[in-house]
Image (tube, rainbow, N blue to C red):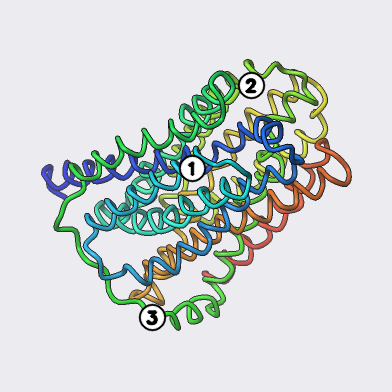
Amino acid sequence: MTEKQTQHATLILWSLAISAFAIGSTEFISVGLLPLLVSQFKISLAMASLTVSGYAFGVMIGAPVLTILTARWNRHTLMVGIMVVFILGNLMAASAQNFAWLLVGRLIAAVIHGLFMSVSSVIAADVVAPSKRASAIALMFTGLTVATVTGVPLGTFVGQHFGWRFSFLFLALIGLVSLLATWILIPRNLPVGRPIQIKNIGRLIFDKKILLALLLTIFGYGSTFTSYTYISPIMTRLMHFQPSTVVIILIVYGLMVAIGNTVGGRFANQTPLTGLLWMFTLLTVTQLFLGVFISFKWMGLLMVLLLGLFAFMNVPGEQLVIVQLAEQDHPENIGLASALNISAFNIGIMIGSGLGSQIVETTGLAMTPYAGVLMGILAIGLTWLLKRATK
């Protein structure tokens, strides 16, 4: 690529990262607000966690359906529309007078989340040299990791000091900034995708290698959420940190996520499946030790930070694997394959947080990491099977 093309690609990637920051802040902000929502709406912790799993459900549905419906849309117009809906969803959540209305607002914001991530992943992979694809996807996903570093802790801080409604207003404001960045930075002449037929979903799912890739995303990515969904109450109730300290810990946690995401992108550039095997193994071992030390303040904190390091490290590799497999056998459906993988990420969140909520209700917070261990073991096995299938 020429220097001009490289600069143009970098501009596109950073514009995507800005939007990913806004959307990423929305996805995970409920993790820090669960105690406040429990108090406001007089609901159980498991019920409050629906703001996490319900959001994931919206992403799961929205990613493939809206990707199909908008395949021929101008990409600049589509990205602008996505951010407008994002702002409206968060304004609805901020104005909620009951828990059901809050969930509706979350669902509206979630539906376009999947569309954004599926389209932007393909754009990120297409605008750079083949050897830099995983790193490009990692840069785009840096918006999500920076959201974990600053957006989620800041939203949690705002909620603790000014009320949870202001946290969603804060997200709407970030969305407005992102809307302006999208309008200015995203080129108006990006390639338009090919028409996508619904029946092609079946072709992809019944491809053994694609199916294995989707399953390893579900269990590998989702394994973190059995405990991460409840990380705030874990740190306050079991590790006995003050709520103000939890905000600081979440910032450090986010820094660890950013490091892990960058490292994961570099490891995945050449041999993504080998990299994923190592990543899932390290993540699973960390969750095992989190369970062992969950009631020990400082050792537990160390495990939480290591969880941040390994939690999203697998994301670039998982997204690259699905794009590579689609390029080999389903080149006309790369965008749809990417969308299905975004759905898989969020099915993983639903399974992980849902499994965690059942454990909280039956055996308590302390057992949630062990469910993540079981999901991690499944992810390791699925990655090994896919690696054999692609030889």
Q: Where is residue 33 in the image (x, y as percent from the top left)?
A: 61, 32
Q: Earlier in the sequence, mark 1 or mark 3?
A: 3
Q: Distance between the residues labelled 1 and 2?
A: 26 Å
Q: Earlier in the sequence, mark 1 or mark 2?
A: 2
Q: In which quarter of the image is residue 97?
A: top right
Q: Where is residue 124 in the image (x, y as percent from the top left)?
A: 31, 52
Nearer the camera: disc 1 or disc 2 = 2
Q: How many C-alpha atoms fall within 10 Å of the one at disc 2: few (<14), some, or many (≥20)?
A: many
Q: How far apart are marks 3 and 2 (CA)?
A: 46 Å
Residue under the point 36% across and 33% down: 173
Name which residue type carries label 3.
Gln
Badge 1 vs badge 2, beta-carbon distance below 8 Å: no
Query: Front-most of 139 and 173?
Result: 173
Q: How many C-alpha atoms fall within 10 Å of the one at disc 1: few (<14), some, or many (≥20)?
A: many
Residue 146 appearing in the image: no
Q: Residue 246 carries which label?
A: 2
Q: In this view, does 79 lie to the left or right of 204?
A: left
Q: Residue 344 carries which label?
A: none
Q: Is residue 18 left or right of residue 379?
A: left
Name which residue type carries label 1.
Gly
Residue under the point 55% across and 53% down: 274
Residue 166 appearing in the image: yes
Q: How many C-alpha atoms fall within 10 Å of the one at disc 3: few (<14), some, or many (≥20)?
A: few
Q: In which quarter of the image is residue 292?
A: top right
Per the image, the residue denoted by label 3 is 197
Query: Front-most of 160 and 210?
Result: 160
Secondary structure beneath dot 2 equals helix
Secondary structure beneath dot 1 equals helix
Q: Residue 264 carries which label?
A: 1
Secondary structure beneath dot 3 equals loop
Establish if 255 lies above or below 180: above
Residue under the point 30% across and 77% down: 195
